[in-house]
Image: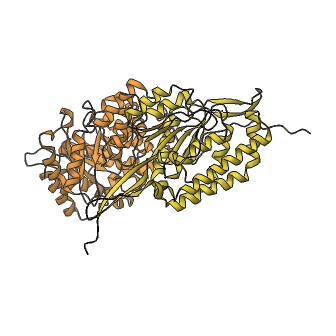
């Protein structure tokens, strides 16, 4: 469900208490209660200690695969690399046809056409068994380009067939308190996600939490992105360390939970970067289920941005089905 | 004032570090007369899994080192071993109930064997490889290359000599090793881990698990990321089942050996864990 821009604007004006200006946004965002960092980290750590075994683990592994945005974001990407990524997205494990498919492939904007062609009939909504194409846009990963370039970048990917746009916010503007500028850019990019038929590509807003320095900033940026109409909030580009961490994702999930209580709208969350093992991914599933509820564990509300995670999940899955440990020779190399 | 003896609880050796067993279990190591010597970690299947991961990640560095360098690193181990001779003798006397002279002989022989294998590092290729005669304008060359990760069940009724005899040959060509120490006499293997940690061997090249070989060996035999299995000390185990499990993933397998000359030094033990690569190359056109 894509959130309509008019509704989002009206909601934002309502909450901020007037026009969405720098001053009003600052008063609103900086009035949000601060985060107890120690408490947040303790809560995240305690959620990571759950022991998930046997049938629950099998369920979790399959669900993780269904939630993965299989990603290749390298300067050295080629149409061939994208085709092999798509092949892996469609058949993650050729030795086991019961393996589910991933939710989407995530590529640079100029590779969208190749991804769409390679997917063919499999291109579609992951809720109905298809695989979406997500494109990073707006001068990813730095976001340092004029708004006109960012919008052209976005519109280009959408017209090439991207179902989802991963945009980056202007962290420089955010950190210097120009919230209005960040808000306006997200609104403009959202508008650029409009297709010819009037529908919208899903907009994921990347906060790049590794550059935001504090949990309070993460919380404010999450509110700001949701106010501006983002369908998803995403932790990181994967190009900056630290990328996704459990406490950061937990704080974003709390914002999503509060927004849902406030408005009834369901916003998605996508941790990306640094999640490499099934064990870590399962901790995220637990955190999601405990914070916003199990109904969030669907492809249109939760995603993992990952590339090497899939292979580790497949190895664990093979261990469960065969009863013995598997090795890297039994999964494909990306 | 009398000295209060420190009762030691030893740990595993995985990836160059000394972690406790994931299971948290330890077993008592007793002398021949039944007195307490130390606690040894009881490795679980997850420790074996971690050890294989560590061994796998060490393969490229160890097999990529020059043969000459590998020889130097292995020789350095023999030097450190020699420096700790007294400790090894005392442990063998306590656990095997043999005379100090017999224990000394065992340690000396272990050092000699280690040096003998270290010397083979930059020589076994010349002996095992070949320039093959072909009827055409080509060179045809066969060279031995390391297999990868080797899982070893060390001889169970020998402290140091059996352990060294099983470990050294697998390392020569550049394999990395996960070795299950003798269940009854693990002290020498544990001290050997300290020797390795204070010499130049990269972490993960040798991973030492103590505890029950009966519990852990099946997991290594069936592990798809283990390339070869040395069952030299697996007489008392259900080694036929281990061989069958190993066959599922096409591992190279060495059968159990028994008697006083078990795991005797031989070039064949080095060659057992190598793959032969044959390349054709055109001769110069002029």
Count of picture labels: 0
Which one is in front, B185 or A4? Answer: B185
Q: Which chain is orange?
A: A
Q: Quadrant of residue A287?
A: top left
Quadrant occupied by the C terminus of chain B: bottom left
Residue A120, percent across and down?
12, 43
Q: Which chain is yellow?
A: B
Measuring 73% from the left and 50% from the top, which residue is drawn there? B84
Residue A78, percent across and down?
22, 57
Give the residue furthest to the bottom: B286
Residue A285 shows in the view = no
Residue A2, percent across and down?
19, 40
Residue A197, percent across and down?
7, 45
Q: Quadrant of residue B179?
A: top right
Residue A76 shows in the view = yes
Measuring 51% from the left and 36% from the top, which residue is drawn there? B48
Which one is in front, A18 or B222? Answer: B222
* Figure check: A63 above or below B203: above
- In the picture, measured across the screen, residue A330 lies left or right of residue B66, that is left
Q: Quadrant of residue A79?
A: bottom left
Which one is in front, A80 or A251? Answer: A80
- In the picture, measured across the screen, residue A25 lies left or right of residue B194, that is left
Which one is in front, B23 or A203? Answer: B23
Quadrant occupied by the N terminus of chain B: top right
């Amino acid at each position: 469900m894509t959130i309509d821009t008019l509704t989002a604007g009206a909601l934002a004006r309502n909450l901020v208490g007037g026009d969405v200006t720098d001053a009003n946004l600052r008063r609103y965002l900086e009035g949000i209660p601060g985060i107890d960092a120690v408490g947040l980290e303790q809560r995240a750590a305690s959620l990571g200690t759950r022991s998930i075994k046997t049938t629950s683990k099998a369920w979790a592994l399959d669900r993780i695969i269904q939630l993965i945005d299989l990603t290749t974001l390298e300067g050295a990407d080629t149409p061939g690399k994208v085709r092999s990524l798509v092949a892996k997205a469609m058949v993650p494990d050729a030795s086991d046809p019961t393996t589910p498919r991933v939710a989407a492939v995530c590529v640079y904007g100029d590779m969208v056409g190749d991804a769409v062609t390679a997917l063919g009939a499999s291109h579609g909504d992951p809720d109905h068994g298809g695989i979406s194409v997500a494109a990073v846009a707006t001068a990813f990963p730095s976001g340092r380009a004029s708004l006109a370039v960012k919008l052209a970048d976005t519109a280009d990917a959408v017209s090439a067939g991207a179902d989802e746009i991963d945009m980056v916010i202007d962290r420089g503007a955010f950190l210097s308190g120009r919230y209005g500028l960040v808000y306006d850019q997200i609104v403009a990019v959202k508008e650029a996600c409009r297709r010819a038929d009037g529908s919208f590509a899903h907009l994921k807003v990347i906060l790049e939490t590794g550059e935001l320095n504090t949990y309070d900033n993460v919380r404010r940026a999450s509110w700001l992105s949701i106010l501006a109409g983002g369908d998803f909030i995403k932790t990181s580009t994967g190009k900056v360390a630290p990328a996704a961490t459990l406490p950061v994702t937990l704080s974003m999930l709390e914002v999503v939970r509060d927004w849902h209580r406030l408005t009834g709208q369901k916003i998605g969350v996508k941790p990306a970067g640094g999640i490499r093992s099934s064990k870590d991914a399962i901790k995220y599933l637990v955190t999601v289920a405990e914070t916003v509820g199990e109904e969030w564990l669907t492809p249109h509300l939760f995603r993992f941005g990952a590339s090497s995670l899939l292979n580790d999940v497949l190895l664990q899955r093979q261990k469960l089905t065969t009863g013995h440990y598997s090795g890297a020779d039994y999964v494909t190399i990306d | 004032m009398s000295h209060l003896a420190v009762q030691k609880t030893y740990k595993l050796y995985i990836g160059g570090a000394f972690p406790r067993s994931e299971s948290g279990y330890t077993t008592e190591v007793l002398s021949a007369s039944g007195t307490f010597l130390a606690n040894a970690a009881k490795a679980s299947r997850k420790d074996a899994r971690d050890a294989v991961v560590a061994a796998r990640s060490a393969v490229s560095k160890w097999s990529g080192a020059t043969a000459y360098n590998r020889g130097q690193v292995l020789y350095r181990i023999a030097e450190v071993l020699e420096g700790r001779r007294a400790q090894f003798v005392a442990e063998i006397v306590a656990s095997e109930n043999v005379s100090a002279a017999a224990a000394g002989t065992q340690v000396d022989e272990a050092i000699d064997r280690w040096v003998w294998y270290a010397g083979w590092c930059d020589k076994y290729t010349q002996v095992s490889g070949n320039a093959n005669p072909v009827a055409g304008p080509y060179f045809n060359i066969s060279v031995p290359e390391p297999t990868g990760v080797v899982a070893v069940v060390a001889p169970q009724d020998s402290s140091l000599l059996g352990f060294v005899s099983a470990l050294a040959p697998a390392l020569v060509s550049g394999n990395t090793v996960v070795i299950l120490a003798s269940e009854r006499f693990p002290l020498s293997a544990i001290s050997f881990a300290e020797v390795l940690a204070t010499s130049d061997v990269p972490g993960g090249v040798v991973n030492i698990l103590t505890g029950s070989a009966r519990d852990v060996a099946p997991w290594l035999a069936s592990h798809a990321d283990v390339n070869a299995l040395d069952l030299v000390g697996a007489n008392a185990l259900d080694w036929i089942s281990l061989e069958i499990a190993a066959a599922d993933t096409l591992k190279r397998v060495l059968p159990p050996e028994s008697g006083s000359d078990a795991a005797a030094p031989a070039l064949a033990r080095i060659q057992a864990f190598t793959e032969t690569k044959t390349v054709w190359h055109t001769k110069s056109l002029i």
